[in-house]
Structure formats: structure tokens, C-alpha cells
Image: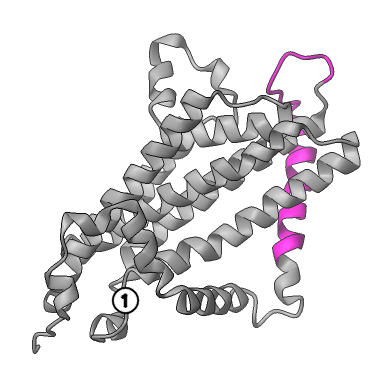
Amino acid sequence: MGKVVYTSEAKLFTWRQVLPWMILADLMRHRHLIATMTARDFRATYQASHFGLAWQVMLPLIMLAVFYLVFGRILGGRFSNAATEAPVDYALALFVGLGIFTFVSQNIGNAPSLITSNIGYVKSLSFPLELLSITSVLTSGLTLVISLGLTMIVMLLVKGYLHWSVVCLPLYVICAFLLSLGLSWGLSAIAVFIRDVAAIVAPVTLILMFMCPIFYPASMVPKQIKWVVDMNPIAVIIEDGRACLLYGVWPTPLSAGILFLVSLAVATVGYFIFMRSKAAFADVM
């Protein structure tokens, strides 16, 4: 196979180009392409179905109804000992937690095949491969935003109000986006050279699911292993995001700031790994 020579931009990649504002400026140059690819992938999900994009609303509502019936009514699940907690409260808590985790895990699961399944893009000198992760995360992010929007609508219908702390929810969505993007960049690049990454991702994702407070509140975790949850940014996003949306708990500036910086660091490191590696993709594939 002949070697594909990338542009000088890929060869001269330096640490200055991974500064957050430099990454943002570089991505903004491709904003029209990002928007076009994201819209195409989002529409293609249900393009062949009769209801089309209506499934993006119908499926989350069906899942929420199942959570309410099975976990709320039949199993009697609870996230707190408050006498005022109703089955629908547990269903909403589970729905929000699972929705955020599904968003992150879906991008982790898709990452290993992003580059290896797009050989045509790899052989192109002009296509910016880093956009594949961007469009993948944005496409699944639209589903997350719809799910959270439906959660707020159900809260308004059931309880008649929303907590003012819901204004902090975009912060956790942004952190989930940055975290997913960094992991997608890093894993997709590594998977080109180490194909075993695809086999490892599935069990690791399953382990992560049980390490996150999705089916239970973080307060139930024994103090001896509480640090495992506290050190897991995905768990923090789920717990604190759910608290500000459903329970009116305002995040502390320190914890919110640390979470944002950690998420930004993951995105930056993932971008660095990807950009330093992409010049060799064509040779390996």
C-alpha cells in the first residue's frame, strides 16, 4: 500500500495547538462541515422508519414509562427516605442518570471504529479526521438534550414547577460533552494501532455503569469506597446533574470548577493524542 503524505499542518503539530482556545478556533473553521455532518447523521438514524425523527421523542417517553412501572411501582425503588418521594421521582432519577451515562458510553463504544471504518476519509488529504469524533458526540448529544428536555416537561406536568437550580444543568451537559469528546479522540486514535481496544471497551463500559450512581444515590456508597465515585467524573456529572435538575441542589463553585477543568483536560489530552497520531493512520491501515 502506498503511503499517504499528510499536509504540513499535521507534521508540525505542537503543544501550542492543544491550548483550549486554539482547539476551539481550529474547530470553528470547520463549523459548517460539522453542522452538515451532524444533521445528516441525526436524520439518518430513523430515516427509513415511518415516524422518522418522532422516535427521538417517543422512545424516551416509552423508556420513562417503563422505568415508572417496573422500578417505581413494582420494585418500589427510592433515591431518598423522604416521605414525599413518589414512584415517578425514582423513575425520573433513573431516567436522567441512565440518559447521561448512555450518552458517554455510546461515544466510548463508537470510538474504536470511527477511524478504522472510514478508510476513505483517512486517505483524503483534505478531510479533517478529528471531526468524526465531533459529529459522533454531537449526534448523540442531541438525543441527550431531548431526553433532558422531556424530563423537565414531565416534571412540570407532574409537579407543576422546576427548580431554579436547573439553570446549572447546561454546565453538566458541557462537561459530559467534553469528557465524551476527549475519550472519543483518544480511543479512536489508539484503536488504529491497537485493535484490541474495541474488545476491551465493552466490559470496561459495563464496569463503569455499576460504578456510577445510576440505580442508586451516591449517599448509599460505603465511606470506605466512596472515593471511587468521587474520583469518577462520569459519576459526578450524573449525581450533581441529577441533583440540580430534580432536587433543587445548587452545585458548589469549587466542585463545579474542578469538574469542568477535569473534563476540559480529558478533551485536551484526547485531542493531543489524536492529532499527534493521525499522520500515521494511513500507513497502518
- In reply to whether residue 59 is colored magenta, the answer given is yes
**Which residue lies under the disc numbered 1?**
128
Q: Which is nearer the eye, 87 or 4?
A: 4
Q: Which is nearer the eye, 128 or 80?
A: 128
Q: Position of residue 137 (x, y in %)?
A: 47, 61
| Vertical order, 44 against 65 (above or below) | below
| Vertical order, 203 against 241 (above or below) | below
Q: What are the residue bounds of the magenta stretch?
A: 56-84
User: Coloring scheme of the render?
Assistant: one colour
Q: Position of residue 4 (x, y in %)?
A: 13, 85
* Left or right: residue 165 compared with residue 14: right
| Vertical order, 199 against 231 (above or below) | below
Q: Position of residue 272 (x, y in %)?
A: 23, 56
Residue displayed at 50% across by 31% down:
256
* Left or right: residue 121 compared with residue 12: right
Q: Position of residue 68 (x, y in %)?
A: 78, 39
Quadrant of res 76: top right
Q: Which is nearer the eye, 285 or 26?
A: 26
For disc 1, the neighbor class at 10 Å (few under 14, some 14 to 19, many from 20) is some
Residue displayed at 53% across by 74% down:
35
Residue displayed at 46% across by 32% down:
257
- In reply to whether residue 45 is colored magenta, the answer given is no
| Vertical order, 227 against 180 (above or below) | above
